[in-house]
Image (cartoon, rainbow, N blue to C red):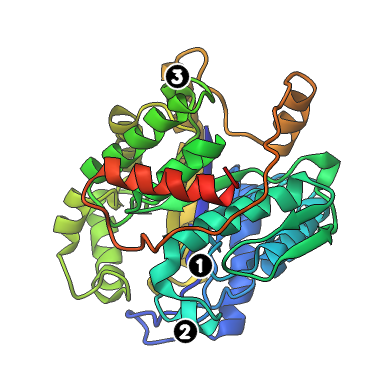
């Protein structure tokens, strides 16, 4: 079981002091947080991609490349990389470079993002969100897997005899998680390729998360990648800890009430009862996290959002100290409950070892254009799966 933290890179005023950190302070803080996450024994640090205030992380690979030079063990990832508005060629180049610089200590999470205006800023149409995600990812895989790519699609100019450089480290493409909150098509895409599925359930009730992950597991097995229990699942979460519940609630309440993403809405008590947010003692965070398994089964990666809502760096580092103390307990408990045959989260080393043991059938195809926009929610999961399957097959040229 991997434990880690992710940042949405917000620049938010501290409601208890009225101080707003500068972008420079927040960028430097992200490095300090990642380094401390490694020091307390966490496995993963991830940062998002945004191109608008109040967020600073417009270039996650730059940040992660710097952090790679400052750390030795921690896996570096994203939360998320925008597969819709980034050129797949640039993604292939940037993350292969990060893979080399980190000696394979990286993976990445693909997502569409939740900021509508970003699409026209990068010359795209938000109504094409799902087709963009599927076509761009089909191309990205080929750029990593094939030394010379000939490709034509709907959303970018054709490629003729193109080689993406640098080539992936050891010939192993970075492992990809597909992050989604509400789109069954993305769960289908992750299942089709046998990739990981990360459900960032920080704003949704567990009933919704349970349904999305069950759908992904079912389709993972359908495509022959293993049993449903062997699907690669990650969960989001968020917490604020103190020595006792009363102190935690008193300290975190002003941050919750003024947070840009959920402030001025439901009460903190309502939000903690309806979502995975846990504000309380270390034991309460342990119990809540262990309880996720009852809804989604055994999973491979647990990530927490703690660097947000204006919390000062000193407080975030203290929260990491708390997390470092309880992770060994949770790791031991999850391991004791995990049935035989449920895999660990893939790493570069495990994928490299597996390459010599498996024979892989490559898809040889000429990509075609995707169909009409499926950005709107479909009527039901079956309709979403049919739409996603059609888009994937078109993107794969089948």
Q: Quadrant of the C terminus?
A: top right
Tag 2's secondary structure?
loop
Tag 3's secondary structure?
loop
Give the side of residue 295 with respect to residue 351, left or right: left
Q: Residues within 10 Å of mark 3 (few under 14, many from 20)?
A: some
Which residue in the structure is indicated by mark 2?
53
Q: Is residue 173 above or below residue 31?
A: above
Q: Which residue shows up at 62% across the image and 83% down it?
A: 24
Q: Which residue shows up at 24% across the image and 73% down it?
A: 263
Viewer-side residue, 172 vs 252 = 172
Residue 243 placement (x, y as % from top left): 34, 49
* Sequence-wise first label, 3 or 1: 1
Which residue in the structure is indicated by mark 3?
338
Disc 1/disc 2 C-alpha distance (Å): 23 Å
Residue 75 placement (x, y as % from top left): 66, 47
Badge number at residue 5: none
* Sequence-wise first label, 3 or 2: 2
* Sequence-wise first label, 1 or 2: 2
Q: Is residue 331 above or below residue 18?
A: above
Residue 228 placement (x, y as % from top left): 42, 24
């Amino acid at each position: 079981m991997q434990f880690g933290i992710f940042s949405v890179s917000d620049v938010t005023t501290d409601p208890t002091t009225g101080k707003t950190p500068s972008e420079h302070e927040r960028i430097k803080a992200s490095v300090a947080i990642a380094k401390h996450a490694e020091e307390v024994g966490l496995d993963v640090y991830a940062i998002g991609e945004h191109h608008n205030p109040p967020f600073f992380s417009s270039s996650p690979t730059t940040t992660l490349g710097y952090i790679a030079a400052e750390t030795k063990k921690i896996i570096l990832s994203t939360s998320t990389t925008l597969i819709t508005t980034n050129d797949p060629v640039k993604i292939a180049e940037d993350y292969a470079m990060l893979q080399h610089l980190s000696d394979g200590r990286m993976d990445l999470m693909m997502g569409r993002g939740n900021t509508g205006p970003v699409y026209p800023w990068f010359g795209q149409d938000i109504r094409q969100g799902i087709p963009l995600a599927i076509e761009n990812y089909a191309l990205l895989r080929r750029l990593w897997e094939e030394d010379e790519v000939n490709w034509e699609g709907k959303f970018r100019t054709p490629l003729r005899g193109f080689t993406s450089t640098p080539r992936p480290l050891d010939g192993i493409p970075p492992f990809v998680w597909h992050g989604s909150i509400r789109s069954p098509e993305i769960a289908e895409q992750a299942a089709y390729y046998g990739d990981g599925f990360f459900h960032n359930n920080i704003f949704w009730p567990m009933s919704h998360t349970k349904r999305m992950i069950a759908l992904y597991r079912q389709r993972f097995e359908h495509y022959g990648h293993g049993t449903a229990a062997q699907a690669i699942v990650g969960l989001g979460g968020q917490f604020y800890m103190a020595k006792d519940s009363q102190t935690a609630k008193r300290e975190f309440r002003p941050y919750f009430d003024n947070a840009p993403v959920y402030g001025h809405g439901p009460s903190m008590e309502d939000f903690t009862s309806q979502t995975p947010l846990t504000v309380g003692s270390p034991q309460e965070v342990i119990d809540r996290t262990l309880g996720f398994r009852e809804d989604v089964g055994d999973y491979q990666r647990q990530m927490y959002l703690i660097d947000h809502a204006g919390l000062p760096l000193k407080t975030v580092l203290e929260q990491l100290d708390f997390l470092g103390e309880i992770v060994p307990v949770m790791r031991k408990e999850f391991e004791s409950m995990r049935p035989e045959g449920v895999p660990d989260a893939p790493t570069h080393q495990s994928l490299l070892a597996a390459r010599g043991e498996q024979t892989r059938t490559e898809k040889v195809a000429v990509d075609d254009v995707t169909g009409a926009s499926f950005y709107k929610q479909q009527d039901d999961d079956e309709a979403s799966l049919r739409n996603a399957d059609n888009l994937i097959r078109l993107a794969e040229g089948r």
